[in-house]
């Protein structure tokens, strides 16, 4: 390495203080051979430390934390809600990273809503609402498999409340189901 002539203002080698954005947490320091830079509070910069990297705002893989309470572990799920009234049908959904607690809350809320609002149009009755309920049941298994976030590691959580089968509105679903059964039985009785 040649020494540039003195007096050149551009000659001073600038220390490479920029951490490697691809550095793995816990990996080797990326500044080998470069004077150690002081951190923001005078402490030596620990560039392999994930907190430091987060503080610096460098690209990190998206942390799997809950969209509601920032707790971990979390998984990306999409719960759906369906409402059908005569010809008016609406499709709702809640999608994102959810922990076990908040995911369960969303599952129960949207499923219960579907169970009492979802049956009142023909397409909803036979197609969309059964699909929505089944979909939510399958997706709920993903969040139920997660460990709940450890206390102190998350913010305010969505209250999961009581299970779907303890919510009276869910039993509204029996009305159209019983009606369909009634029609089928009546039809069979007339045919015989
Ligand atoms: Zn959560």
Image (cartoon, grey):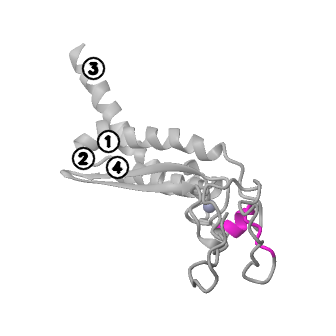
Residue, disc 2: 121
- Give the CA distance from mark 4 to mark 1: 8 Å
SS label for mark 4: loop
Residue, disc 3: 189
Residue, disc 1: 128
Q: Residue at x 67, y 47 (%)?
A: 146
Labels 4 and 1: the sequence-earlier one: 4
Can residue 29 be seen here? The reply is: yes
Labels 1 and 3: the sequence-earlier one: 1
Q: Which residues are magenta?
A: 44-53
Q: Residue at x 77, y 67 (%)?
A: 46
Magenta stretch contains residue 26:
no
- Give the CA distance from mark 2 to mark 4: 8 Å
**Neighbour tally class for label 2: few under 14, some 14-19, many 20 plus, Cα within 10 Å:** some
SS label for mark 2: loop
Q: Quadrant of the C terminus?
A: top left
Labels 1 and 2: the sequence-earlier one: 2
Depth check, front residue: 111 or 143: 143
Q: Residue at x 61, y 57 (%)?
A: 63
SS label for mark 3: helix
């Amino acid at each position: 390495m040649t020494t540039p002539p003195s007096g050149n203002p551009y000659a001073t080698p600038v220390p490479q203080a920029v951490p490697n954005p691809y550095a793995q947490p816990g990996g080797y320091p990326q500044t080998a051979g470069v004077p150690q830079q002081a951190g923001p509070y005078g402490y030596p910069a620990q560039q392999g430390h994930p907190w430091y990297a987060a503080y610096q705002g460098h690209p990190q893989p998206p942390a799997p934390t809950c969209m509601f309470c920032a707790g971990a572990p979390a998984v990306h799920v999409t719960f759906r809600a369906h409402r059908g009234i005569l010809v008016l049908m609406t499709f709702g959904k809640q999608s994102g990273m959810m922990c076990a607690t908040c995911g369960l809350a969303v599952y129960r809320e949207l499923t219960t809503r579907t169970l009492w609002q979802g049956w009142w149009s023909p397409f909803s009755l036979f197609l969309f609402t059964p699909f929505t309920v089944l979909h939510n049941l399958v997706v709920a298994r993903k969040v139920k498999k997660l460990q709940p976030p450890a206390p102190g590691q998350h913010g305010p959580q969505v209250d999961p409340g009581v299970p779907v089968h303890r919510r009276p509105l869910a039993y509204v679903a029996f009305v159209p189901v019983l009606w369909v059964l009634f029609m089928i039985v009546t039809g069979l009785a007339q045919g015989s």
